[in-house]
Image (cartoon, helix red, strand yellow):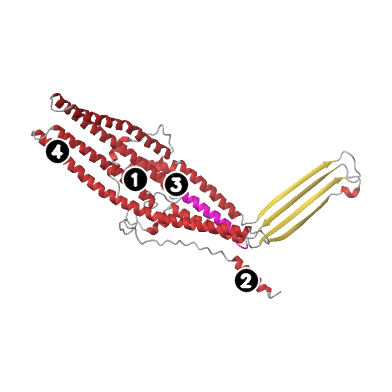
Amino acid sequence: MPKLLPIALVLLLTACTATQINRQSNITLPENFQHTGQADSAPNLARWWQQWPDHQLGRLIEQGLQHNHSIAIARSRLEEARATSRLAEANLLPSAGLAADAKGYRNHRRDPYLGNGGNLTSASFRAAWEPDIFGQKRSDADAARAAALGSQEQLHGSRLLVSAQIAEHYLRAAHIQQQQTLVSQQLATLNELARYAAGRFNAGHATAHDTTAITAQIQALQARQSILQAQFDAQQRSIAVLIGQTPQTFRLDSDAMRQAALLQYLPSPPQGIRPGSLLNQRPDLRARTAEIQARSAQLASAKADLLPRFDIQFLWQTGRIELNSDLAPFNRARSGNGGLFSIGVQLPLFTAGRIRANIQAADARLQTALLQYDQTLLQALADVDNAYQAQHALNAQQQELQQAERTAKQQVRNDRQLFRYGRKTLDTALQSQLSVHSFSQNLLDNQLASGLNLLNLYKAIGSGWQEEGTQPEATEAAAK
């Protein structure tokens, strides 16, 4: 028997050893992104909208972070996950309880032994504990805690998406508003051209084809103009939903939007972003990490099913009996107390492969979580470079379009001057003016694409959220 003791101790210590799970990613991070600029340090973009020159947009995003229902739902789910985690932690500790019982009875038939009535009272104290010798309960608690961390990252992701969605609808609304201005300018130019063509037609210097073509352009532009207000209102309602307000009563400050001219003053893309920062900044990657932790703990718990389980029970009880009897010995009250202490052990012997199958399933779920992490990481690396490259391309395109617009405006001035000297007809200058409107529309579309891509860049690098409890006091004031 003494020879078996060292073997038993080795087996026990081996069983108590924490399960080692390989949770390393197979992805090698590059040192830098291909299309991001170099900087000494990365900027703090947790509240990137504060760097945008539009106070109305900043207020709307702050209101959305305070009152958005998707964020509130994510916060509620986080509270549920945290409560579940506390429940799993509580399962590690003993449980105890008190019980009391009182009974009475009356017998209509007089019994010389039991009498015609009696009382029975008792009280007890119970305690139970299942020692977590092999760490199964700890693994379950770790899994629940990791699940709560995953829910927390979903809350962070909700904040990131809501801030970007509000800004996206705001940019689209600003784009539509400036489109309305451009369309009005185009209509004014076309109406002037139509009057000039009608005069030339009446003088016999133009054909009906010329006047009809201009009329068709005016009608097409009026048709386009009729839908712009509906599109603006749709963006306005989308913002109302995101900030938790009634769509029918919410209105954007159009004058403030025109004054800010946000599309013309977009900030530059952030510099100094490195691939390693994504691991701690992107909520989806952080959520994948929490999922791996949860799956690892679940695998450790499944493996612990192969090992014995112990339980300790304790019961202390007291009671008192009183009988109304004709016999003197039974008239005395009887009372007593006692206790019970027990230790039990459960060891699986034959489970028809259920435990092994559960371990294999848990291991497969862990491997899936690792693969999903690698997939998400690769996509994140691609998202950042895609957004940076697109931003640089859009900026280069914007410079070319601005140059083209300046050239077209110079052409209009030249044609106007030649018209005054009788070297050109007025329709030439008006057609040049229409070309300027076309270049302005292309430039406006480029500015919208640049703003939307900048939002994609913020999402790609994980900007737009911060930890719980770090909201500054100015946030609540701005949201009111």
Whether tag 4 and tag 2 are in contact, CB under 8 A, the answer is no
Q: Which residue is mark 3?
A: 158
| Quarter of the picture holding the C terminus | top left
Q: Circle 1 sits in a helix, a strand or a loop, which is it?
A: helix
What x and y, as percent, mark residue 299? 56, 59
The amino acid type found where label 4 is placed reads Arg
Amino acid at circle 3 = Ser
Residue 158 shown in magenta: yes
Check disc 2 and report its element: helix, strand or loop. helix
Q: Amino acid at mark 2?
A: Val
Task: Tell me the tag on residue 10.
Answer: 2
Q: Earlier in the sequence, mark 4 or mark 2?
A: 2
Q: Which numbered marker is on residue 4?
A: none
Seen as rendered, the residue at the extreme top is 202
Q: Amino acid at mark 1?
A: Leu
Q: Which mark is residue 452?
A: 1
Residue 63 in the image, given as x and y percentages of width and height: 41, 41
What stretch of residues is rendered in magenta?
Answer: 133-159
Is label 4 in a helix, a strand or a loop? helix
Q: Relative to residue 156, is residue 237 depicted above or below?
A: above
Q: Give me the C-alpha separation between circle 3 and circle 2.
A: 49 Å
